[in-house]
Image (cartoon, rainbow, N blue to C red):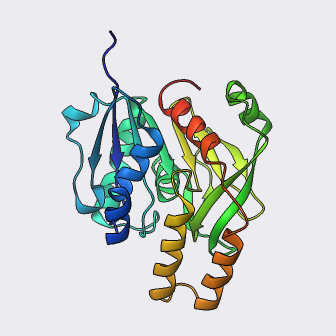
Amino acid sequence: MGVAKKFAVLLCAEDSDYVKKRYGGYYGVFVEMLAEEGETWDVFRVANGEFPDDDEIGGFDGFVITGSCNDAHGNDVWICRLVSLLKKLDSLKKKVLGICFGHQILSRALGGKTGRAISGWDIGVRTIHLSSSSSKLFSSLKTPPTLSIIECHRDEVRELPPKAEIIAWSEKTGIEMFRYGDHMMGIQGHPEYTKDILFHLIDRLTQHCYIEESYGDELKGKLEKVEPHKEAWKKLCTSFLKGGL
């Protein structure tokens, strides 16, 4: 019997009451997508200043950084602390998967640049194109050259870290995915989201006046007609995190 694998979710968002009640918080959403029998999954609410101790880090096989309402180019105390932690995880060659804000903060920690997306908000289900090198990388998964994913962001990675490689792009965002060595990968979209979560977020963005109500209604109408490739993303993320890629 091998030793059970152990993973940590670095939670960068505050859970809404709805997501807590329906999914057990965003931690629950990630565990639903990634966890397999026999594994241990912990959560560190880094946005609340809860971080793993230095002597704990070595015990984890991999880390997942979640989305956030905060800007990855911000300098809040917890964001700067997270950047330091990610640099440490890089030096230890730990597997790290960054999602949305996580993708951006991972890029920043490795020397890339993030900022407001020049083309504005990207909300909905978007088709992303995998690069030819990533098609080879994911060939064992039989991943198609284009995949649909749920997006909900207004920031983006503007400049890749040195030695990082773009592995997917879209018409809206130049760096949809990047890979750094064999141990770090960022995804701008949300492979973990359901359309139900996105509907809920559109309502919240409307209520807080981030987007117009008419635009929110238009987005919801479009969502009725499209589906993200959730199973393909699940395979891709679990294979990367658990050493299959």
Q: Which quadrant of the rendered structure holds the C terminus?
A: top right
Q: Nearer the viewer, residue 98 or 149?
A: 149
Q: Quadrant for residue 95, please give it.
A: top left
Residue 238 at x, y = what percent?
Answer: 51, 34
Q: Is residue 65 visible?
A: no
Residue 77 at x, y = what percent?
Answer: 28, 63
Q: Nearer the viewer, residue 199 or 204?
A: 199
In the displayed structure, would residue 87 be above or below residue 123?
above
In the displayed structure, would residue 112 be above or below residue 63?
below
Residue 89 at x, y = what percent?
Answer: 38, 37
Q: Quadrant for residue 173, please give it.
A: bottom right
Q: Which quadrant of the rendered structure holds the N terminus?
A: top left
> What residue lies at 43% left-to-right and 54% top-to-bottom?
66
> What residue lies at 34% left-to-right and 54% top-to-bottom?
11
244 vs 46, left or right, is right
59 vs 90, left or right, is left
> What residue lies at 68% left-to-right and 77% top-to-bottom?
221
Q: Is residue 151 visible?
A: yes
Q: Nearer the viewer, residue 240 or 114?
A: 240
